Structure formats: C-alpha cells, structure tokens
Image (cartoon, rainbow, N blue to C red):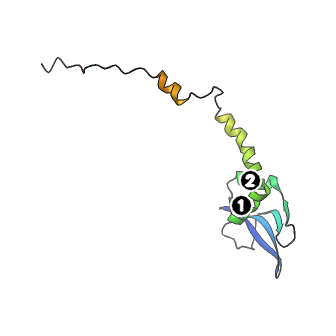
Amino acid sequence: MSVKLRLARVGRKKKPFYRIVAADSRSARDGRFIEMLASYSPIMDPEILSIHEDRIFHWLDNGAIMSERVRSILKREGVLERWRQTKRPEAEAEWPVSEAPEETVAEKISSLPEEVESEPEEDASEA
C-alpha cells in the first residue's frame, strides 16, 4: 500500500475548503483517508492553515509521497525545511566533516613529485 499526502476537498459549492490527508494512493480524492494532517482554506484572506507537523513528519519518515500542491503548501509554510533540519543531525553524525582546511589547487600541484626524465628500460630477455 502506497501512502500519499494530498488534498481532500470539503466545503460547499464555490467555497472550497481542503484537508491535507494521508491516504492510500488508490482511494478517491474525497474518499477514505488514513489520517487528517492539516486544514487549508484558500478563499480566506490571508489563507487559513492549521498543520499537525509531528504527524506530517511521521508520514514523511515512513515514506509517504506528497502531491505537488501539498509539497508547495508545506514548502511555503516552512514545514519541509524543518523536516530536513531534523534529518541533518543524523546525516552529519554518519558523515563527519573534516575540520582541516582543504588544500588549494596550487598547493596540491606543488606537492606532487617532479617528473624524472628517464629512458625506458630494455628487457634483457629480448636481447
């Protein structure tokens, strides 16, 4: 079963109101869902958005796929950036960064051994 984070439309005609839900990818747009994660009202000025970040993080950690619209909403609200920041400490712990400064290209070239011009040695077996 593939889980998607997507919008489910509720509200009446010409007054849309959306929920960001975790749903099976095979279910209908407004059909059955696993969990409601946020609500979104695009008509209000400013747009009203209430988000349960911890549950969104849970579903993203478990491999849920976001729709394009949900991705843009979460990105605009900064949720995706906060989710990535929770992942970075683990990545930094696995791959420690060397604190030594990197050598410049000129230093690398100067540290190379000088080429020695020599004649190729002839094999004694050929003679």
Q: Are marks 1 and 2 in contact (CB under 8 Å)?
A: yes
Marks 1 and 2, Cα distance to the nearest angstrom?
Answer: 8 Å
Q: Nearer the viewer, residue 82 or 110?
A: 110
Q: Is residue 30 left or right of residue 120?
A: right
Question: In the drawing, what numbered circle is on residue 27?
Answer: none
| Residue 91 location, quadrant | top right
Give the residue type at disc 1.
Arg
Question: In the drawing, what numbered circle is on residue 80?
Answer: 2
Element at label 1: helix
- Which residue lies most toward the front here? 106
Q: Is residue 68 left or right of residue 14?
A: left
Q: Residue at x 66, y 27 (%)?
A: 99
Quadrant of the image containing the N terminus: bottom right
Q: Is residue 61 left or right of residue 115?
A: right
Q: Nearer the viewer, residue 29 or 114?
A: 114
> Is 47 situated above or below 118?
below
Q: Residue at x 77, y 64 (%)?
A: 21
Residue 75 pos. (x, y %): 74, 57
Residue 67 in view here: no
> Is 46 situated above or below 77?
below
Q: Residue at x 52, y 30 (%)?
A: 105
Q: Which residue is disc 1 drawn over? A: 71
Give the residue type at disc 2.
Leu
Element at label 2: helix
Residue 95 pos. (x, y %): 64, 34
Q: Nearer the viewer, residue 100 or 72?
A: 100
Quadrant of the image containing the C terminus: top left
| Residue 35 location, quadrant | bottom right
Residue 51 pos. (x, y %): 83, 59
Residue 2 in view here: yes
Q: Nearer the viewer, residue 15 or 29?
A: 15
